[in-house]
Amino acid sequence: MKALVAVKRVIDYNVKIRVKADKTGVETANVKMSMNPFDEIAVEEALRLREAGTVSEIIAVSLGVAQCQETIRTALAMGADRGVLVETNAELQPLAVAKLLKAVILQENPEIVIIGKQAIDDDCNQTGQMLSALLGWPQATFASKLKISDGHAEVTREVDGGLETVAIKLPAVITTDLRLNEPRYASLPNIMRAKKKPIVTTTPDALGVDVTPRLVVLKVEEPPKRQGGHKVGSVAELVDKLKTEARVI
Amino acid sequence: MAALVVAEHDNSTLKPATLNAVAAAKEIAGQEVDILVAGKDCRAVAEAASAIAGARKVLLADADAYDHGLAENLAPLLVKLAPGYAHLLAPATTSGKNLMPRVAALLDVMQISDISAVVSPDTFVRPIYAGNALQTVQSNDPIKVITVRGTAFPPGEATGGSAPIETVEPTGSAGLSEFVRAELSKSERPELTSARIIISGGRGMQSGDNFHLLEKVADKLGAAVGASRAAVDAGFVPNDYQVGQTGKIVAPELYIAVGISGAIQHLAGMKDSKVIVAINKDEEAPIFQIADYGLVGDLFKILPELAAELERRQ
């Protein structure tokens, strides 16, 4: 079966972000960009399914500016077979992303779609659930274990109380949590090989999707700073301060 | 301009996160806040919900299909009820996060995730980049589908109300998914997201066995026990202990971080705590920059001392 993974280009998770002085957003100029870490886990899981013989082909899709091609190349260097770039300079919100992915999926007919549970930039945690709703497919979010057998997936999910396992019919959308796997690094030969793998470029217009944002961002601000940094010299002093100064115990 | 809040429950008890979501809904819709209890044999939950102060009515949808909160089965119910409401809200718990985007997509609206403040009925504040920036967004959609960050909205009263309970016709099973099993952690301690005091361990704990040192202190304080992602990834404790950007968001009166360096993604989950204590042997650890009280030293000496000192001064 075919697997489709969606990969988002985000500010690298090691970068300390800066809010723009005019409060319109977060500074992205000259900032290191990388693949959303949860999407790396999605790519890795698809690769493991292919290595197990369950998946025959992996298509990596990214949506956004032309540079998203680099994110697709990263997925190809990890081992994905080919890429699809939905190129646009418009701001894409999760509902629009889900509609675009649906359009690509209707062309590609994958039986399993694996994507990160959330992107570390907008922290929305929506796209997978929206996509499965639009397709009328089942969803298994926050996956920490995935087992596939004859037309079904058994997925263990990380939930607030512990773990929950669900069985879903394929085709389905799976969103990845942190402990599903540890993504591999792309080796240099694979990075070189990835340059020759095909990437097809399309656009929201060509896919017939209206991507107009539904949410208007009025402003982006820095959160209030915490005043910390006080040290105490002993356990007795700590307990004393918590009792008499902070009055929390 | 009524609002509907999806209650969080396990078919027998109403979870406290519901009260935070109701508090947010009241800021939006005032007196017109209804609560949906969808589950199986969950009448007791509906009765608990009807006692929530300020609720207008409780909608009870009782069916096999709603037993385990499967989003594929619940989303059509929300879609059916949506025309009576301007706002649909749920706590930003794993169940709310799982369900609400599915509802939003079926209604062709954007969800507003994890709101931390209500500016007006169509404008909300939400954290982005692990809480390192706050975004104010205005929704142009006819129905606002919202998940609520519990720590940002003090819970309303759980008692004092007597809202009528109305039964709603279930929508049935979508036939797409099935619950197989749950492995839920059992603990006598308070839940992380509603605890008044939390003590968390990080990689510095070195093993799962060493968490008993934290538990001894937790017992003295009536505290919940949490962990950093590093401690969960290392297999010291199960995933439901994780506090952070993608784990649980907490804001207790007192948060004690032990052997936790203070990675951005951990701070995102606890930096709104009222008082933060950090115990770490590395005095350069970033956690100290946000801690109200920092204690530099060996946690394996400090934790037993702390338990003894708390015992002595009880």
Image: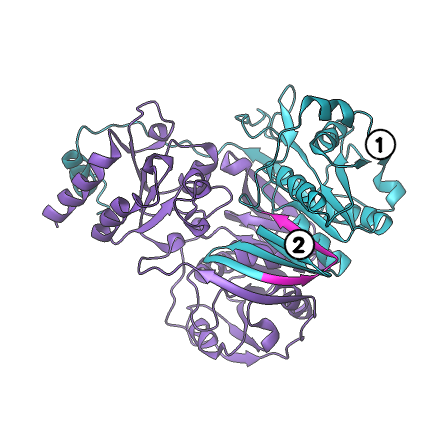
Chain colours: A cyan, B purple
Q: CA distance from mark 2 to mark 1?
A: 29 Å
Location of residue A172 in the rendering, given as x and y in whole percent from the top left corner = 71, 56
Q: Which structural element holds mark 2? A: helix
On what subunit does the disc labeled 1 rest? A
Residue A194 makes an appearance in the image: yes
Residue hosting label 1: A198
- The percent coordinates of residue B86 (x first, y second) are 63, 61
Residue highlighted by disc 2 = A129
On whether residue B311 falls in the magenta region, the answer is no
Residue B91: x and y in percent read 51, 57
Residue found farthest to the right: A206
Observer-side mark, 2 or 1, equals 1
User: In the figure, is residue A147 to the left or right of A15?
Assistant: right
Looking at the rendered structure, the kind of residue marked 2 is Gln
- A19 vs A143: above or below: above
State the image coordinates of residue B151 (x, y, percent, origin top left): 43, 50
Chain of the residue displaying label 2 = A
Using the image as rendered, state which of residue A128 and residue A148 is in the foreground.
Answer: A148
Q: Main secondary structure of the magenta part?
A: strand
Name the residue nearer the viewer: B272 or B222: B222
- Tell me where the magenta segment starts and ends, as one range: A166-176
Q: Earlier in the sequence, mark 2 or mark 1?
A: 2
Q: Is residue A174 magenta?
A: yes
* Quadrant that contains the N terminus of chain B: bottom right
Residue at 48% across / 75% down in the picture? B46
Q: Amino acid at mark 1?
A: Pro
